[in-house]
Each structure stands twice: as structure tokens, then as C-alpha cells.
Image (cartoon, rainbow, N blue to C red):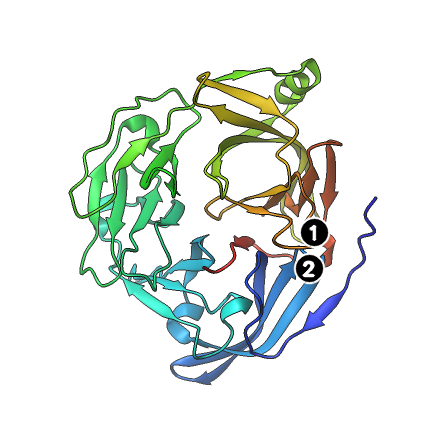
Amino acid sequence: MFLLVSRTRKLRSFSTAAQPYLLVRERDIAEKSSSERVFTLNLLDPCKIETVKIPGKTIPTELAQSSRIGSSKGWVALMNRQNLKLRLTNLFNPSASSPIISTTISLPPIDRFYKGSVARFSNVSLSASPNQRDCVVAAKLFAPFISLCRPGDSEWTHIETPNTFFGSVVMYSMRDQKFYLYSSDTAPTDLIKTCSDFPPVSPYRRFYFSDIPKTTQDLYQSSLFRTEYLVESPSGDSFIVIWCMDSGKIEKETERLKCDTKGFMVFKQDHGKKLCSYTQDIGDLCIFLGKNESFCVSATKYPGLVPNSVYFEGIETGFGFYQLSSNTVHDLTHLAPFSAFYLWLAPLE
């Protein structure tokens, strides 16, 4: 039993311990100068289940005018819709609130190579923190290509992918030291040709689902919407997570369609048996899903997180967490202001 009480914690602009946060949206944006804006940073702390406000944050006007397109390793990726310039920043993360620690890194603009697909990003993945020399950025748009670059490069390297990966997501595997493309559709598993300057890119091979209980099969078949995610645990285990949703109703306040989360199905890849086995027990792990690159942390390392749970966010669903052992959804959306773009932030490395 969880008592969900709305609480708010105000912080000054200093660094806090690295942990997961949910980025909600900026408030009270005001112009400080022609090149800077001042705003209040709004987040949700999933460990304490309370909102966090950091007033007086300064942000470059260029970032304030950019759209969030994803997050990875605790960094937020943004794109200016007018000049197509991309940037990575950690200044939205409370763990880097100090001006000494907060950093913004410019990336090459996404060129017209995508012929109109540029506005639709699937997700962004980092092989390491952008502060590290070996960092490679992978951007996946709704197009039959994946784009790679290193911070400091003058242009992106576009790599063609099979058409079945048009709308796929990209994830970097620390275990295998490569970028994986994941699609729920049947797809080829051959290595995609890349240049030697970048880690390999490969379609992810999912084994056959097995050990699915009848009630779980009913959940899958009765769900109107289903989304699949690939996530890797800190120890290197791979999981496929299926988010099952139903259509809801139009909310008067936001005029948006609210979808109901029915549940999550978690499958663990067994490379020995070549099976993807259903499980309701992932130990003390917590999985975080949404527009971010999916990530997984230990609840033991971050006290307050509910072990054996899936934390979720989405504009249609709101945000909350799902306890796998009891099949219980805990909706936390009411704890924070409505946002058109929620975003989980992984602990900064």
C-alpha cells in the first residue's frame, strides 16, 4: 500500500546526489537578456514521490527556443526547429545544477538529408557521457537511417538501415559495446555496415516469447495499444518490455486523449536457451520507460524506489509506476503540472 501525497521540495541551484528524475516542464520563463532566460525547473523525485522546484535557473535563449527530443545517460537532447541545430545539456538535471558542473554541448545540425522527417525523432542514445572522449551520439529518426557523430564533429554520418527499422529505437549496450536497433516487427539481424570510427550498429535479435500465463495473454490481446521496449540492466541482462494500454477519454483541462495503462509484460532474454521468458520478478531492479532511452537501475542503490517495478511516462498516459508482482498501476500524474513532454533522466555518470 502506497500513500501518494502531493509534496513539493524547493532547491537552490546546487548539485544533488545522482539519481533518476522525471523532467516535467519549465515554468515562469522570463527574459534575463537577449541571450539568456530565467525559469523555474520542475521535476518529480521518484524516490521520495515528491515534486522538486529549482527557481532562478538560467538557460541560453537558444535552448529555451528548442524542443526536447530525448534523453540518455541523464543528458537531454534538444533541437532548434528553425536552424536544425542539436545540443546536449545536463543543466536540466539537479545533479548538475552547479554552474561549474552544468554543460551544454553543440552537435552538427541535422541536415535536409531526411527530407521532411527531421521533425520526428524516435530517440537519442549516447555510448558514454558527452564529457568523456569516447562518447558517440546516435540519433534515430522516423527514416531508414541512423545518424552517428562525436561531440566536436562538423557533420553527422548517416548509415542506411533496413526499411523494417524505419520507426525503430536505438539503444547502446554497455555489455556488447554496440548500438542496437530494436523493432517489434520481424527484421533481419545482420550487422549494419558502419565505419571504423564508430561502434558497430546491429539489429537486436529477440528470441521467441515463452512461459506466458493465460491472464497475461488476455492482457495483451485485450489492449488497444501496445509498445515494445528494449532495456539492459546494470549487470548486462536484456529485457523486452511490452506496455499495454487502452483508449481513455478526452480531458477537458488539456483537451488531450488520456490512455489508460493496463499493465506491463516483461520478458528476459535467455541466450543459452535462445528464449525470451516471461517474468514477474526482476529482483530489486526498476525499469524506466518513455521518450528517454530506456534504462534500468537498482532500487537498493536509490532508496525509495519500489523494486521489481516499471516506471513510465507519456503525454497520453501521464506518469507513474507499475508493480510487477501485484500487477498494480500507481498513477502519479496529479503530483505535477501537465507537460506535453515528460522525460525520465537517468542518474548522471
Against 120, is 12 above or below?
A: below
Q: Would residue 274 be found to the left or right of residue 180 on screen? A: right
Mark 2: secondary structure: loop
Most foreground residue, 146 or 209: 209
Cβ–Cβ below 8 Å for labels 2 and 1? yes
Few, some or many C-alpha atoms within 10 Å of disc 2 (few <14, some 14-19, many ≥20)?
many
Residue 167 in sight from this viewpoint: no
Which residue is drawn at the image coordinates 32% and 41% (left, top)? Answer: 177
Which residue is drawn at the image coordinates 30% and 23% (left, top)? Answer: 189
Against 279, is 7 above or below?
A: below
Q: Would residue 212 be found to the left or right of residue 2 on screen? A: left
* Residue 94, picture quadrant: bottom right
Residue 103 in picture, x, y percent from top left: 39, 71
Q: Which residue is mark 2?
A: 336
Against 243, is 316 above or below?
A: below
Badge number at residue 192: none
Mark 1: secondary structure: helix
The amino acid sitting under disc 1 is Thr
Against 312, is 280 above or below?
A: above
Q: Quadrant of the N terminus?
A: top right
Few, some or many C-alpha atoms within 10 Å of disc 1 (few <14, some 14-19, many ≥20)?
some
* Residue 101, picture quadrant: bottom left
Q: Quadrant of the C terminus?
A: bottom left
Residue 6 in sight from this viewpoint: yes
Q: Which residue is mark 1?
A: 333
Q: Would residue 232 be found to the left or right of residue 260 on screen? A: left
The amino acid sitting under disc 2 is Ala
Residue 303 in picture, x, y percent from top left: 68, 55
Which residue is drawn at the image coordinates 68% and 63% (left, top)? Answer: 51
Residue 245 in picture, x, y percent from top left: 63, 32
Most foreground residue, 349 or 63: 349
